[in-house]
Amino acid sequence: MLRNSRLSCRAVQLTCFKRALSSSPVKPPQLTSTPVKRRRFKFSYERSENTVIDQKQLKVPENKLDFRKYQRNNISLNISEAQAKKIPAVITLHARLQLPSSYKYSTIVRALTCPKEGEQYPDNKQLAIFGANLLSFYTTEYLITKLSQIANFYYKECGRCLYWRFSLADVAKNSWGIEEDRTSNIEKYLAGEPSLFRFGRLRFDRRVTRVEKGITKFGYPTETTLDDSTAFANAVRAIIAGVYAHEGEEAAKNFTHEHILSRKIDIPSMFDFKEPGKLLTRLLRVKGMEPLTVRLMSESGRLSNRAVFVVGCFSGENLLAGGEGSSLKEARIRSFVNALKAFYLYKPLDSKMPSDKEFNPLFVDEGEPFY
């Protein structure tokens, strides 16, 4: 009797479970007419934080490709080449950067002059915009050709390390020695400094002014106010644009590689692999290589408190990478990480960039299908 009641209860439960399943069937996804938004990667994020001025405010020369002869209508004063050669800071900067003789000293004066309220001298507004595009192009092609295996996310991070405003400000201050004009007119008068010398330093409307130690004055933000890092970065961009205007594309490219792209980036520290073993196994399967095997290559002091194990990860008989650690698990994980870094940080021996004359289109990377 009891057994029959238990069987009947289980039958009732199964019937209720079937009814619950049948009452809420899984509906197929409905197709909508709205397009699916796909994630798009942008390698270049360089901006000069300036807006392009209206063409009505410009005096356009007959040859529209001659960028040096563009002038704004509200510019009534100008620093001539003879006056610029009398400024010691401009002469020193010209020699320190090893600029060609065709690079005018008055162009350096313009590159160090940011837009200011009531300013009647030519500023670096348009030069900074053009220089930002040059930096973006040269940096992007450099990273794609030199580091062809890394993911798209790291292109952006490497670019930020090279041409972000804080990086360019560091180049301007510490490498090029550009100084900021902080002294007032009264201090210049008491020091007996000629008024022309102020054009040899970076001049801009400060957004934040440090009055003294521990006291900071915040000004009302306007279209011309800039912070220190943006102003110094715009000066670097304007100087690069001046190299292009005076010497051409090849000289601007060499100047950018020498002063900006030659800075060292610690790319291995950017990697953070959560499951390096699974990622390496998946990578080998996609590349059509033999499965991953791990072997103990050497050890020392297994029974002591300072044991050292050296583990190698292999694909068949090919050693991918080795790693050492105080335990077998640590050494195995380090070998996986070293193998992944060796793959992603691969650099071609003789890679040509698209801007090179002898460049031929080539197959760089087939993508990342294992993600």
Image (cartoon, rainbow, N blue to C red):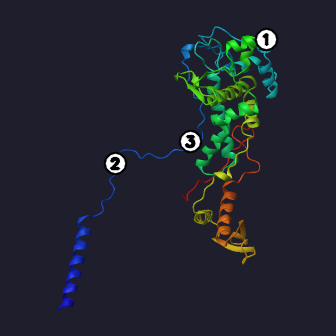
Tag 2: amino acid: Thr
Front-most of residues 342 and 310: 310
Q: Residue at x 63, y 36 (%)?
A: 164
Tag 1: amino acid: Ala
Does residue 254 appear in the picture of this structure?
yes
Asked whether the beta carbons under mark 3 and mark 1 sit within 8 Å of each other, the answer is no
**Count of numbered labels shown in the rendering:** 3
Tag 3: amino acid: Lys
Does residue 66 appear in the picture of this structure?
no
Q: Residue at x 74, y 33 (%)?
A: 174
Residue 42: give its label: 3
Label 3 or label 1, whichever lies nearer to me, is: 1
Label 3 or label 2, whichever lies nearer to me, is: 3
Residue 32: give its label: 2
User: What residue did someone put label 1 on?
Assistant: 82
Percent x, y for residue 159? 64, 41
Gap in Å between the C-alphas at discs 1 and 2? Answer: 69 Å
Front-most of residues 237 and 181: 181
